[in-house]
């Protein structure tokens, strides 16, 4: 609507023989890509640089701004706790974060026009955790936020995941930040496994546990705009913030139906330490710790370990093999002795194991854990038979204690 009004005004001025203001002819729409905000401002092409009204970015970037007219100082507080300061007419800005400060050089100085501060669009966007691109065909600037943030009300803290840097920050009630970790796996899934055009619509912190060796166990759920998909992450974050493989829970859901679940809520796979932890589901206290070197030795061809069940004495995991990449095969671990029992070979006759394969040309099978009760594990043994592929269900059991 704004663009239509502007075009009509331009045409009217031309018909009346009036010249357009020099800046008006250079107006450029600023679009919040993949966001309900849509068009958020008009930028100005001033001396070859595209400027944007600074305030127009704050709703998209969730930043806070303060303007002190006395010393012409603009202070911007980002969602990750960083503070950016600048002055109109100055080409330098200062970025302060986690106790460190550095000067940033802008491609052109910020300008104060009719009481509104304008800054170079690329500098402003990238330093407010946004990606920026130029749509030459539409002659528009496109912005997309590259962070996810969510509060955790019980402690009045907020957590921000910087998707560009793959870093996770915790901010206390005063807005002071600390680096919790570098969950690169989480950032990779959000940016690569899904269409990069999908915007993270909302995030919800479910639990924050201070756990083993000062680590923080964080349960976080994300949902995405227009994708009908949400993901759930359970991260283990080391105190030094240097862990690079902290994605230890991944649940993918679509249209209300779960289609992949890689762990249960009370267990943690800790790749750096080659350990499995069983946690109390209410407090996060460590109930058991298992070194899985013996598991890897017992199942050398196994891939993609995931949790199914744990009762403090025994743990049921599932794994995959190259020839059975889509099938989850159960393995039982005695947490006291470390003994590993491959339940796939215990429960499925040798002549039927070939049915657990990656193609559907000659039929296929699945073995799904359903429950544990009174020392017995229950599984649903499903055989999918062509040509209808109707599943034949059979319950099989295994007494584990």
Image (cartoon, grey):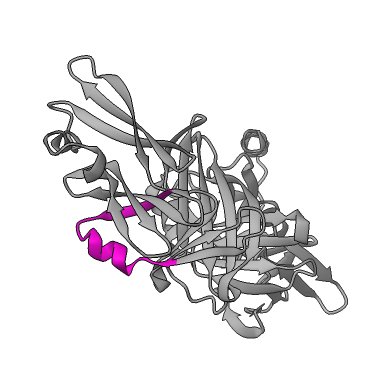
Q: Nearer the viewer, residue 112 or 396?
A: 396
Residue for point 67% across, 39% down: 13
**In the image, 82: left or right of 335?**
right
Q: For the magenta stretch, what is the residue range?
A: 290-308
Q: Residue furthest top?
A: 388
Q: Which residue corresponds to the image point at 67% horizontal and 52% vertical from the top-left? A: 21
Quadrant of residue 72 within the rendered picture: bottom right
One can see residue 150 in this view: yes
The residue located at (64%, 62%) in the rendering is 209
Residue nearest the observer in this picture, 347 or 222: 347
Tally the marks.
Answer: 0
Question: Is 303 included in the stretch rendered in magenta?
Answer: yes
The quarter of the rendered structure image containing the N terminus is top right
- Nearer-the-camera pick, 182 or 320: 320
Residue 310, horizontal then vertical, whole percent: 47, 51
Indicate whether residue 73 is drawn in magenta: no
């Amino acid at each position: 609507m704004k663009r239509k009004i502007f075009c009509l005004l331009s045409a009217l001025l031309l018909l009346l023989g009036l010249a357009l203001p020099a800046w008006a002819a250079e107006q450029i729409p600023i679009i919040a890509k993949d966001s309900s905000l849509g068009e958020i401002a008009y930028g100005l092409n001033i001396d070859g640089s595209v400027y944007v009204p600074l305030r127009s970015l704050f709703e998209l970037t969730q930043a806070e701004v303060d303007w002190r007219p006395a010393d012409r100082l603009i202070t911007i507080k980002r969602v990750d706790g960083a503070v950016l300061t600048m002055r109109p007419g100055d080409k330098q800005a200062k970025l302060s974060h986690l106790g460190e400060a550095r000067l940033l050089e802008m491609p052109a100085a910020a300008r104060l026009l009719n009481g509104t501060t304008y800054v170079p669009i690329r500098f402003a966007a990238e330093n407010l955790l946004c990606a920026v691109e130029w749509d030459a065909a539409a002659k528009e600037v496109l912005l997309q936020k590259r962070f996810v943030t969510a509060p955790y009300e019980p402690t009045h803290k907020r957590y921000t995941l910087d998707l560009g840097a793959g870093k996770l920050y915790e901010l206390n009630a005063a807005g002071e930040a600390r680096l919790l970790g570098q969950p690169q796996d989480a950032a990779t899934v959000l940016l690569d496994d899904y269409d990069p055009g999908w915007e993270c619509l909302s995030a919800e912190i479910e639990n924050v546990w201070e756990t083993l060796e000062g680590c923080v166990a964080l349960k976080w759920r994300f949902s995405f705009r227009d994708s009908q998909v949400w993901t759930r992450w359970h991260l283990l974050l080391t105190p030094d913030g240097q862990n690079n493989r902290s994605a230890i829970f991944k649940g993918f859901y679509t249209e209300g139906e779960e289609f992949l679940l890689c762990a249960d809520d009370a267990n943690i796979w800790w790749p750096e330490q080659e350990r499995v932890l069983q946690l109390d589901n209410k407090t996060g206290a460590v109930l058991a710790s298992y070194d899985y070197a013996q598991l890897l030795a017992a199942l050398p061809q196994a891939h993609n370990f995931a949790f199914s069940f744990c009762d403090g004495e025994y743990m049921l995991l599932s794994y995959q093999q190259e020839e059975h990449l889509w099938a989850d095969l159960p393995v039982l671990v005695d947490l006291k002795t470390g003994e590993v029992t491959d339940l796939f070979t215990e429960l499925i006759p040798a002549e039927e194991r070939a049915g657990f394969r990656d193609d559907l040309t000659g039929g296929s099978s699945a073995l799904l854990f359903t429950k544990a009760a009174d020392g017995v594990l229950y599984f649903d043994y499903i055989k999918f038979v062509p040509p209808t592929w109707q599943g034949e269900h059979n319950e099989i059991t295994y007494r584990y204690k």
